[in-house]
Image (spheres, grey):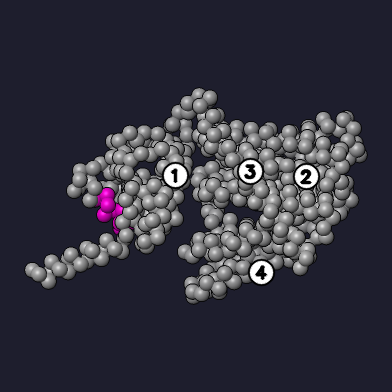
Amino acid sequence: MTTAAIYLVAACAAGVLAKAVRLPPLVGFLVAGFALHAADVEELPGLEVMAELGVTLLLFGIGLKLDVRSLLRPDVWFTTLAHLGYSVLIGLALLLGLAPLGFAVLTDADLTELAVLAMALSFSSTVFVVRVLDDRRDHLTLYGRIAIGILIMQDIVAVIFLSFTKGHPPTVWAFGLVLLLPFARLARRLWDHLHSIELTALFGLTMALVPGYWLFEEVGLKGDLGALVMGTLLASHSRAPDLSRMLLTAKELLLVAFFVGIGLHGIPSAEGLALASLLLVLLPLQGLGYAAMLWVLRLRYRTAVLASLSLTNFSEFALIVTAVGASAGFMSEEWLVILAVSLALSFLVAAVVNNLAPQISAWVTRRLPDQEPARLKPEDRPIDLGDARALVLGMGRVGQATVTQLRDAYGMKTIGVEHDSPRAEDLRNRGFRVVEADATDIDFWHRVHRAPDVELIVLAMPFHGENVLVVELLRKMGFAGAVAAIAQRDDEIEELKKHGATAVFNLYGSAGHTLADEAARVALR
């Protein structure tokens, strides 16, 4: 218990200090790992297992939100493969260029070892990127979806490479994994009958760790990939978002062990620290590569820059490849410590850069030539709201009634915003003016380039958290008009007003008043 207490105090204190200086807590957790190693504190039993569980639940959660069709986008698969080749070339060039400087670990390395290192350094960290997107609530934005798609493609490439690096390609039983398709259908039916919170959470853990992680490991594939696949197979279930939120706390706590564990790999020599720092030269080159490729694929500067900044870091995969290479005898074990430090430094640099990402993307956009809207992908083109005076966000029954009332009773030109494609199309066929977009996506608001007459925005989305998020976005972006919202409880009303809502209406209270008025009118007729 003493060792566990030391780890808890160190991680908590370092995380709080990192947050105090406006850095993500994970940077503090990395520092805690280095400090614990420097203090010669014994490794906490089970830390590696907890770290592995954290990564597994992270990938399972990604799978629960994943639309497989997103992997077929050219801006995902083309960028992944083209950037992989580009990164290996510049990585190999850098390592060969540093070799004459007298670094012993480079002098003794052959071309194969350097090529493997360059490939290991070409991947981005799934753990870091998803954490950055979650912290900014940007995982559903266009750039967030592209970044996650690229990460998943990289994971697939990594699994294939790792299988051959280990010298143990997948067994013939791997072909039997196709049976997971009918199994997933049965699992989704079973899920329909699990209404207990405890059983639902246990069901999710079981799916991630047994048919996901364990089964893939047994047939010679990476268990983390299995968790991702299993999450993807369950993603079509209506309660998948609820399960993802349910596992969130456990995942976050277990990932602390992952980041602390990286720091425990050790402190390098002065020469090793210098080499680890020099490897950071690759980061801006890799970031420029991502941005250029995404721009060529007809994305806005802002989308390309934000995606590239989120992906500009080294991956924990570099440590896995190095460990396997060292155990196989064709790589020096010294690389493990060097890359652990370089990985931690890349997280530190990436954390600082991503905190400034909106300002950097705005700076880049101002200094580059204007992009022709017709050249851009349809989902990334500017949105013209024309002469609309009111926006209604969320076009369910409440939103539809609001649009109708504002338009017919008050003569206000009103546009609805709806993220569900079939519903948006149906509403347009019924005569509503509707823009298909996610109002909680900050990209939507950045794409709205002409809305001079909008004076009222009504938040009619069904989830309170979404309405709060949009109020925050509107006020931060300087919208000075009226913002009205719906709520279901008194505490929700107060929270919305606190964040800047002009008027908030209790959905059930309003219904009760209307019901009473109608009942009295009938009774007194």
Tell me if label 4 and label 1 are in contact, CB under 8 Å.
no
Residue 21: mark = 3
Does residue 487 appear to the left or right of 194 in the view shown? left
Q: Which residues are magenta?
A: 394-404
Give the residue at mark 4. Answer: 210
In the image, residue 376 sits, relative to residue 6, either above or below, namely above
Which one is earlier in the sequence, the residue at label 3 or at label 2?
3
Q: Main secondary structure of the magenta part?
A: helix
Against 95, residue 488 (above or below) is below
- Is 98 displayed left or right of 315 in the figure? right
- Give the residue type that dot 3 points to: Val
Quadrant housing the N terminus? bottom right
Q: How many marks?
A: 4
For the point 74% across and 45% down, the residue is 343
Determine the secondary structure under disc 1: helix
* Badge nearest the viewer, 3 or 2: 3
Assign a secondary structure to mark 2. Answer: helix
Mark nearer the N terminus (4 vs 3): 3
Measured from the top left, where is residue 418 in percent x and y? Answer: 37, 50
Distance Cα–Cα, label 2 vs label 1: 37 Å
Describe the element under mark 4 as helix, strand or loop: helix
Q: Earlier in the sequence, mark 4 or mark 2?
A: 4
Image position of 229 with respect to 198: above or below: above
Residue marked by disc 2:
341
Residue 265 on image: x %, y %: 81, 52
Badge number at residue 473: 1
User: CA–CA distance between discs 4 and 2?
Assistant: 33 Å
Question: In the rendered view, would you say 190 is above or below 167?
Answer: below
Secondary structure beneath dot 3 equals loop
